[in-house]
Image (cartoon, rainbow, N blue to C red):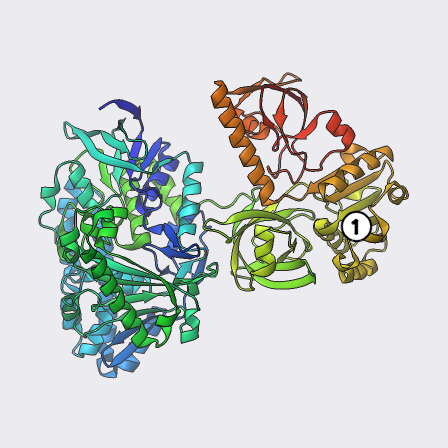
Amino acid sequence: MVSDEAADVVVIGSGMGGLAAARAIAQFGGKRVLVLEQHYTLGGMTHEFSRAGRYRFGTGLHYMSANAGPFLGFMTDGRAQLSPLPDEYDALHFPGFDFAVPATKERLRESLKERFPAESDAIDRFFRTMRWAMAGLTARNVFASFPAGVRRTGAPIVERLFPSAFRSLRDQVSRSFRDPRLRAVLAARWGLYGTPPASSAFGCHAAVPLTFFMEGTAHPVGGPQELNRVVLEILRRHGVVLRSRQKVHEVVVEGGKVTGVDVEDTAAGRRYRVRTDTVVSAAGVRNTYALIGKSHELADLPEERSAVMLFLGLDRSPAAFGLRGENHWFMPDLDEHDSVHRPPGEGTLYVSFASLNNPAARFHTVELLELVDPKVVDQWRGTPESERPDSYRKFKDELTGRLVARLEERWPGLQETIAFAELATPLSFETYQHSVRGSFYGLAATPQRLRSARAGCRTPVKGLFVAGQDAWGSGVVGALAGGLMAANAVLKPRQLGTMWRAILAGGASRDPATPWEGYLRVAGIEVLTPTVRRIRFEPMAGDTMPFSFAAGQYVKVDLPVAIEPVERSYSICSSPGQSGFVEIAVKHEPDGLGSGFLNEELEAGLALRVSGPHGEFTWEPGTEEGAADSLLLIAGGVGITPLMSVLLAAADAGHTGRIVLLASFRTEDEVLFGPELAALRSRLPGLEVSVFTTDRQGRIGLDDLLPHARPTTRVHLCGPASMMQDLIGRLGVLGVPREAIRSEAFVSGRSKETRREKAHAIAVAAVAAGVTEFVIGTVGGVPAFPCSPGQSVLDAANTAGVALPQSCGEGACGTCRVRVLSGAYETDDRGMFSADELAAGWRLACQTLPTEDLVIDR
């Protein structure tokens, strides 16, 4: 095995536990951390998959606590947005009766007493026992994170102090209650951690369904993958290296210490070794011990259950059947011991409706989960997916039919709405989760696990630690806690105080100088013209927008029009002084993917991911630039949108200076913001408005500019590229200084796609010619810098650390102006320059792709 590279710390697995450990160790230990993921997608059970070009499904996170606590806040830097489930979030269905689980401990206690008045005192005692068991589990997990000597001393003491944590759930509810229905209600939802009541430790049950979800539940806005996206972005910012399709074959141990990991890059077919003295495994305890050849040391731990999951796509909202987004649990027997031994498809069934709880979901989905014995697929285990016999497909089809029949029995007519169905079996979880025999939650949550020295973040090997569910508890937040415990074991004592203070603070706060990014709700859609809609966005929670902006700026919006969203930029047309919403106006361009969706398919209530504010096309009253002798605003078509924001900002500030708006539209039907402009005349005494329709009057010409353009005039110009090119030249003729002219261009998705195509063609041609890089020389003492074929001048400058003025990076703002003095290139001038400027070599650095060495000036 060739020793190809080295890392301070290697993390195996990119589930939330592994990512939590990686971040904490990199951030607070200053370590070089490498994360290796065997799957082609990072994120573990927070990743999603899509089917039929429209349906998106989560793989492991179905709901979480509405108060997820500081751990999730830390991992997302407070950027996690959660949408609450209905107040009665879990509906339990037993033979002969139902029970709705309400949010908050007190309401649950009251509901139980109302339903079972004869057991009122016992219910109070049970809640006290529950708190004590939860405390016992926490104490056990903390001791399990300490070195071996402390664990051996502390573990017996914890069990003596907290005996209820180590009892089985079945034993505890039998001790607590006489009524079998009450026992069934409080023993239900063991599916949240995966071990049936006869086997599960009561401490685990007290922690998950009875405590963690007690304050209500929520679903991530944008789906589980949104959490994954935010976390990965933050890790990359901390220098963590993330690699997918990397299969770890062995953790190399020499003299009882970790010395490296042997890895196979399954995409490239390459084997290599990473030298390291610290490995954090988030692949589960069983996989971890297999990597060091010690699987036999886990023989005393009970086998885990796996799962079958049915993913359904509907052509109609589940709300049509009276559903509001609550989860449903179907228990075929009062005694879960009987349910556990039923055939697959007939046991305890969990049903969730993620699309009702995710305001960003366009299409409706249902997910069903039943925990099963992994032996149900033993006859097909070990066969490649493409070679499994018809009997496996028959098994899946029959099981799908049984599960759908249970839905149809509860909600008649729902079966007819199913447009897509796919079943995952334990073999699916073996393949994609890489869990032993498809175990869904890691080690079984049994008393044996709580007593085992192997169930925790410590191992007998120096430098080898465990993160994830097996290091703390089940679920995404439980795995996250396990990752932080692993980091706690790796970091030096002097680093731990800093780490825990940061965690308890909920992560880093956003730098106000950086754009905000998250989801906003579409609050309204208004038809302005036959081809233009005004769209209002409001915050997901509260009354105040999460960011402020300057007049003339824009937002970027991710539009769910394909498997992956497409990003588009739209100028803000509302006032910066309006804190409760932000508005954009969008013209439906022919064949426009994004504008077509916003004009034809968008509905109020949908949440879209937005980032902003962006752009330097700004005007702020009261500033030196905002106090120019006169302000000339020139708009072409929908280019009036940022200028409306400028006018509203001026009106809100009580601006009394001269403002001239020259707005050009093709026809009378396409004139925008007529009523708003009429209203602004009464608020802005110095406002003059001239509207041109090119089908009758032609374009804005020199004579139209003459009365308004002078050397002391500040100009904001926005519209089609050809119009702006002409007007920049004419304004120069009239004596307006170039630096007083601000311009902003329309940017379409096709423009960005065209630039990518050009970049690819340049890169291919360079390879064929044996060229590995171009050199970009500069004047004025700035060193030359390299540019890879296909890179833009701006990207190359940023890579080399050469400072160029920049803002949007996509050709809309015109900030990154450079003058190309020599050399060949591909470019798109975006209408940011006059004909004379283009002839003089002025170009946008973000749009300019060298095809040979260049010399530029700034």
**Helix, strand or loop under label 1:** strand
Going 35% across and 77% down the picture, which residue do you hit?
412
Q: In this rendering, does residue 803 appear at all?
A: no
Position in image of residue 693 (x %, y %): 81, 53
- Quarter where residue 25 is shown: top left
Position in image of residue 145 (x %, y %): 23, 44
96 over 52 or under it: above or below: below
* In-front residue for pair 593/394: 394
Question: In which quadrant will I find the C terminus?
Answer: top right
* In-front residue for pair 204/723: 723
- Quarter where residue 757 is shown: top right
* In-front residue for pair 845/381: 381
Q: Callout 1, which amino acid? A: Ser
Give the residue number, with chain letter if any, for mark 1.
664
* In-front residue for pair 651/672: 672
Position in image of residue 436 (x %, y %): 19, 48
713 over 129 or under it: above or below: above
Crowd around label 1: few <14 · some 14–19 · many ≥20 (10 Å)? many
The residue lying furthest to the bottom in this view is 118
Going 22% across and 24% down the picture, which residue do you hit?
1
Position in image of residue 83 (x %, y %): 44, 61
Q: In this rendering, does residue 838 appear at all?
A: yes
